[in-house]
Image (cartoon, helix red, strand yellow):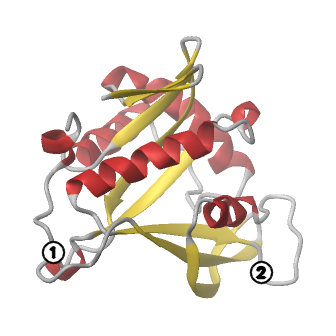
C-alpha cells in the first residue's frame, strides 16, 4: 500500500520505522500534554505496540525525500464486540512538519483504509486545556485539525488527565466513514484489504 500525495509518500509502516517514529513521539511526551503518557517508551516497547496494532489495524508513515515526517494508526475503540465497527485514531508529526499538509494527507489515507476494513466510526481522543485557560504545554490545534477534517465533538471529560502539575480535559470527536446498514458489513483485518 503506497499513495503519492504530491511529493509526499504515504506508505505502510515497517518495523524498521520504529526508531524514527519514537523520535517523533518523544517531544510530545516530554514537552506537551498532547499525549497523557508521561514516560517515553523504550524502543522495544514502541516496536511491540506497532506490531500489535498492525496485526489488525493500519499503521501508516508519511515520508518526503526519504525522511519520515509523521505516522498515524488506528486501534480498537473498545473490547466488546458491539463496538467492532468503531476505531480510535492517532497521529503524530515531526514538530517541524506540522501545518504543511502532511497530517491531512496521512489522516485521509488512514480513514480510507479503515473504511475498506468496514470501520464506520472513526473516533479521536484529544487532550485539550481546561475551558477558558491557556497552557504552555497544550493548545486546541488537534481539535481544530479534526474539525477541519469533518470530525464532530461528541463529548468532553473535565480534569481527567494530570501532567506538568496541571489538570487537563479530554474531548472525543467522531466522524462517520460509511453508512450504518443493518446488518453491517463484516469487519475485515487491514492486511486483507490494504491492496484493494
Residue pictured at 66% horizontal, 34% vertical = 94
Residue pictured at 37% horizontal, 49% vertical = 112
State the image quarter where residue 192 is shown: top left
State the image quarter where residue 7 is shown: top right
Q: How many marks?
A: 2
Residue 183: x and y, percent?
11, 80
Label 2: few (<14), some (14–19) or many (≥20) C-alpha neighbours in 10 Å = some
Q: Nearer the viewer, residue 115 or 46?
A: 115
State the image quarter where residue 11 is shown: top left
Q: Nearer the viewer, residue 88 or 120?
A: 120
Q: CA distance from mark 1 to mark 2?
A: 38 Å
Mark 1 vs mark 2, foreground winner is 1
Disc on res. 130? 2
Residue pictured at 10% horizontal, 65% vertical = 186
**Helix, strand or loop status at disc 2:** loop
Q: Does residue 85 sit above or below 194 in this rendering?
A: below
**Helix, strand or loop status at disc 1:** loop
Give the mark, 1 or 2, whose residue is nearer the N terminus: 2
Circle 1 residue: 184
Amino acid at each position: 500500500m503506497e499513495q503519492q500525495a504530491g511529493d509526499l509518500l504515504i506508505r505502510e509502516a515497517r518495523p524498521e520505522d520504529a526508531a524514527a517514529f519514537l523520535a517523533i513521539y518523544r517531544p510530545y511526551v516530554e514537552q506537551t500534554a498532547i499525549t497523557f503518557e508521561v514516560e517515553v517508551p523504550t524502543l522495544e516497547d514502541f516496536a511491540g505496540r506497532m506490531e500489535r496494532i498492525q496485526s489488525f489495524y493500519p499503521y501508516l508513515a508519511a515520508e518526503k525525500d526519504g525522511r519520515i515526517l509523521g505516522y498515524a494508526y488506528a486501534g480498537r475503540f473498545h473490547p466488546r464486540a458491539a463496538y467492532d465497527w468503531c476505531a480510535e485514531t492517532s497521529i503524530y508529526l515531526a514538530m517541524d512538519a506540522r501545518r504543511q499538509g502532511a497530517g491531512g494527507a496521512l489522516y485521509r489515507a488512514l480513514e480510507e483504509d479503515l473504511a475498506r476494513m468496514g470501520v464506520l466510526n472513526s473516533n479521536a481522543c484529544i487532550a485539550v486545556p481546561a475551558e477558558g485557560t491557556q497552557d504552555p504545554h497544550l493548545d486546541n490545534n488537534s481539535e481544530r485539525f479534526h474539525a477541519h477534517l469533518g470530525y464532530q465533538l461528541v463529548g468532553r471529560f473535565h480534569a481527567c488527565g494530570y501532567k506538568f502539575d496541571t489538570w487537563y480535559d479530554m474531548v472525543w470527536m467522531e466522524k462517520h466513514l460509511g453508512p450504518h446498514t443493518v446488518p453491517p458489513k463484516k469487519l475485515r483485518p487491514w492486511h486483507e484489504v490494504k491492496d484493494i
